[in-house]
Image (cartoon, grey):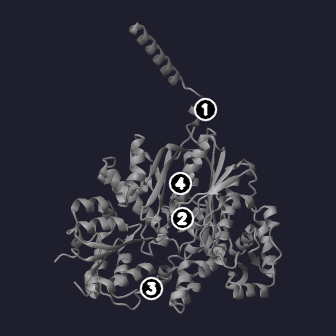
């Protein structure tokens, strides 16, 4: 079963890892519904 | 995890049902990824945010994990994440994430 | 002609009490979890002033050791003291908390900073003995008020306490009864930023060997905002700090861009000087109290001292080309645009590969890259990794992808073209600029020919846009000697040849 298809996806990106919007672009291609995308910053 | 983000995660789980929500993290290190995963499954381990003591058990992955990569369009993933993946210690991230998932995820 | 880097300063103020009372990690914890283990353990993890001075990365920051020396130190750094460490360095100093509080009071123009009488008399002499602190700054230190008065201000008037070794020794009062933009909290934050900026300005003037009156313009590029309810963020930190530093010929303004602020400001300064608008511009920034102890929970959990216990400041002096100092080459500017997106490879591409390609250069043509120079001793235990190293790996990967670097050289790229991070996690402070002082000296000494400074910023923190941001520029050895000769021989030959051709063409046409 697909993990992302038709799921509500919450994204917690990282400024020094993978940022939220970059993850969101990928999720869209898998049929996930991005309901929230944020990027955290530790510096 | 940022307190505001914890609040939002909790709201979405309430609104859509925990079984319908997937949390994807982009942390730079295995440990940080694991902490985020723990927060949305077993509760905030730092006892600071709204998810303290809240066991949502959400399904959670790091964006670089192979199970997710399989579902992404390869070209888009390569363009958005490909180079960062080369920089990250993916093995460490995978091991941290899967151990949290195996222990706390309720909807696998 | 390109403008030059005349000098730079880097200063720290050791402020462990502000970690406890003003760092947002701690103030937030006190609200959501007042009885937490972390708050109980926190104070026993605070470093003494001596430990802070002996800390390798701090000694590198103020110029008592080169980043290359730090590379030789075994990681982690917190448990290794640098031998022969000193308060003063060639770029600045590490000021103790007590003296810094006196400087803060001296920087206050609205009688909001108040110190206790006994505290002032105990530390005033030491403050005055600091060679960089001028007589007119010392003269601004007030006698002080009674401790009962300070207690009343803190307990009844919402003043922010100022502490030394756990004891209340002063306060910052609110500057308005109802305007939150002038609350004691905001006034405290802004005065700390201003005071550390003043210290940086003073050292920069000394280090650049210029007269205070030479500076015509000051750009402040910190991350704080001052103003009242009708113009939150109106400014102007730059001019306010210039006033205390005694830069009588300067005006100035504030430039903001999160962590990328300093790189934006330096490009602006270089352009202002190159255009002839001003002959000498100072780019300055003070420190950020909110970020003190930002990753403290992780540090305490792992048995480390609280490593984020210093306010930091820096200042770079940009002047007209003197034919000697390294230049900022405005023909090689990288910029993250609205259309760039947030994919890490696009970010690095826009800041590193694109500007070099436009200038006909390869990534490997740059001797040293200075992206974000956060000290990994601070970030690694907090799960944020080694930020400079991650940047170098990305740049190297990009170089391989572009065929400019062989895959076998990936592993040694960081060693050859990179630096080990040493800067405190004070937001804008680590972003590219900590290397400028060393870059200037290394280029002057002929150790290298150029360096790229890269600033990146997280605009999404302001909740106005989800966009990322960044700009970059290249510092290179001075080429002014050629430029100064006016039109070169080759150019004259070219002009003559063109005139002859045109003449011949006109003859042919006839």
For the residues beneath circles 2 and 1, the answer to whether they share a chain is yes
- Residue at disc 3, secondary structure: loop
Q: Which mark is residue C264?
A: 4
Q: Which residue is mark 1?
A: C484
Whole-angstrom CA distance, mark 2 to mark 1, is 37 Å
In the displayed structure, C327 sits above or below C433; it is above
Marks 4 and 2: which is nearer the front? 4
Whole-angstrom CA distance, mark 1 to mark 4, is 28 Å
- Residue at disc 2, secondary structure: loop
Whole-angstrom CA distance, mark 3 to mark 2, is 29 Å
| Proximity of marks 1 and 4: CB atoms separated by less than 8 Å | no
Q: Which residue is mark 2?
A: C423
Q: Which residue is mark 3?
A: B49
Q: Could you tell me which chain the residue with mark 2 belongs to?
A: C
Q: Could you tell me which chain the residue with mark 4 belongs to?
A: C
| Near-viewer residue (C467 or C104) | C467
Please report the residue visible at 74 percent of the width from the left and 61 percent of the height from the top.
Answer: C244
- Residue at disc 4, secondary structure: helix
Marks 1 and 4: which is nearer the front? 4
Q: Tell me if C160 is positioned left or right of C295 in this view.
A: right
Using the rendered view, name the quadrant where residue C147 is placed. bottom right
Q: Is residue C435 visible?
A: no
Q: Is residue A41 visible?
A: yes
| Percent position of residue C173, x then y | 71, 78
Whole-angstrom CA distance, mark 4 to mark 2, is 19 Å
| Percent position of residue C233, x then y | 60, 65
Dot 1 crowding, Cα within 10 Å, few <14, some 14–19, many 20+: few
For the residues beneath circles 4 and 2, the answer to whether they share a chain is yes
Q: Could you tell me which chain the residue with mark 3 belongs to?
A: B
- Residue at disc 1, secondary structure: helix
In the displayed structure, C378 sits above or below B37; it is above
């Amino acid at each position: 079963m697909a993990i992302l298809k038709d799921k509500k996806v919450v994204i917690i990106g990282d400024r020094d890892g993978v940022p939220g919007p970059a993850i969101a672009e990928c999720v869209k291609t898998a049929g996930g519904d991005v309901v929230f995308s944020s990027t955290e910053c530790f510096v | 995890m940022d307190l505001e983000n914890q609040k939002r995660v909790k709201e979405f789980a309430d609104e859509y049902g925990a079984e319908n929500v997937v949390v994807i993290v982009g942390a730079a290190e295995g440990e940080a990824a694991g902490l985020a995963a723990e927060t949305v499954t077993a509760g905030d381990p730092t006892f600071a945010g709204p998810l303290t003591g809240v066991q949502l058990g959400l399904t959670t992955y790091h964006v670089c994990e192979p199970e997710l990569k399989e579902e992404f369009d390869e070209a888009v993933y390569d363009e958005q994440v490909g180079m960062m993946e080369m920089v990250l210690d993916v093995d460490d991230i995978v091991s941290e994430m899967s151990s949290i998932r195996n222990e706390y995820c309720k909807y696998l | 002609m390109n403008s030059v880097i005349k000098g730079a300063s880097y200063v720290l103020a050791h402020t462990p009490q502000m970690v406890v009372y003003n760092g947002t990690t701690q103030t937030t914890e006190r609200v959501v979890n007042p009885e937490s283990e972390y708050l109980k353990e926190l104070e026993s993890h605070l470093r003494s002033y001596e430990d802070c001075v002996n800390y390798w990365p701090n000694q590198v920051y103020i110029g008592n050791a080169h980043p290359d020396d730090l590379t030789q130190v075994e990681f982690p750094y917190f448990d290794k003291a640098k031998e022969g460490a000193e308060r003063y360095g060639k770029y600045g100093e590490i000021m103790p908390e007590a003296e810094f509080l006196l400087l803060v009071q001296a920087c206050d123009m609205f009688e909001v900073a108040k110190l206790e009488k006994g505290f002032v008399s105990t530390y005033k002499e030491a403050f005055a003995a600091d060679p960089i602190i001028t007589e007119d700054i010392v003269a601004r230190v007030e006698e002080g008020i009674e401790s009962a008065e300070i207690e009343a201000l803190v307990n009844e008037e919402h003043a922010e306490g100022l502490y030394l070794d756990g004891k209340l020794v002063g306060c910052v009062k609110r500057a308005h009864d109802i305007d939150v933009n002038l609350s004691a909290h905001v006034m405290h934050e802004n005065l700390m930023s201003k005071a550390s900026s003043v210290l940086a300005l003073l050292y920069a003037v000394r280090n650049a060997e210029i007269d205070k009156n030479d500076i015509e313009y000051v750009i402040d590029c910190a991350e704080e905002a001052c103003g009242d309810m009708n113009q939150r963020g109106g400014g102007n930190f730059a001019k306010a700090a210039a006033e205390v530093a005694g830069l009588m010929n300067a005006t100035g303004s504030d430039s903001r861009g999160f962590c990328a602020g300093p790189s934006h400001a330096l490009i602006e300064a270089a352009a202002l000087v190159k255009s002839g608008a001003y002959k000498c511009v100072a780019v300055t920034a003070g420190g950020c109290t909110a970020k003190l102890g930002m990753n403290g929970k992780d540090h305490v959990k792992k048995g480390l001292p609280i490593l984020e216990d210093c306010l930091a400041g820096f200042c770079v002096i940009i002047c007209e080309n003197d034919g000697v100092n390294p230049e900022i080459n405005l023909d090689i500017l990288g910029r993250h645009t609205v259309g760039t997106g947030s994919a890490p490879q696009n970010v690095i591409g826009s800041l590193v590969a694109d500007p070099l390609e436009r200038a006909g250069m390869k990534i490997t043509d740059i001797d040293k890259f200075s992206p974000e120079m956060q000290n990994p001793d601070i970030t690694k235990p907090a799960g944020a990794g080694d930020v400079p190293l991650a940047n170098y790996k990305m740049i190297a990967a990009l170089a391989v992808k572009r065929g400019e670097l062989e895959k076998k050289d990936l592993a040694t790229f960081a060693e050859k073209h990179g630096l080990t991070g040493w800067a405190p996690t004070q937001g804008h402070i680590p972003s590219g600029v900590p290397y400028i002082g060393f870059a200037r000296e290394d280029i002057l000494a002929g150790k290298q020919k150029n360096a790229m400074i890269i600033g990146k910023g997280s605009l999404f923190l302001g909740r106005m846009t989800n966009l990322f941001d960044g700009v970059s520029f290249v510092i290179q050895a001075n080429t002014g000697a050629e430029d100064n000769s006016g039109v070169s021989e080759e150019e004259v030959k070219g002009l003559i040849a063109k005139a002859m051709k045109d003449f011949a063409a006109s003859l042919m046409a006839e």
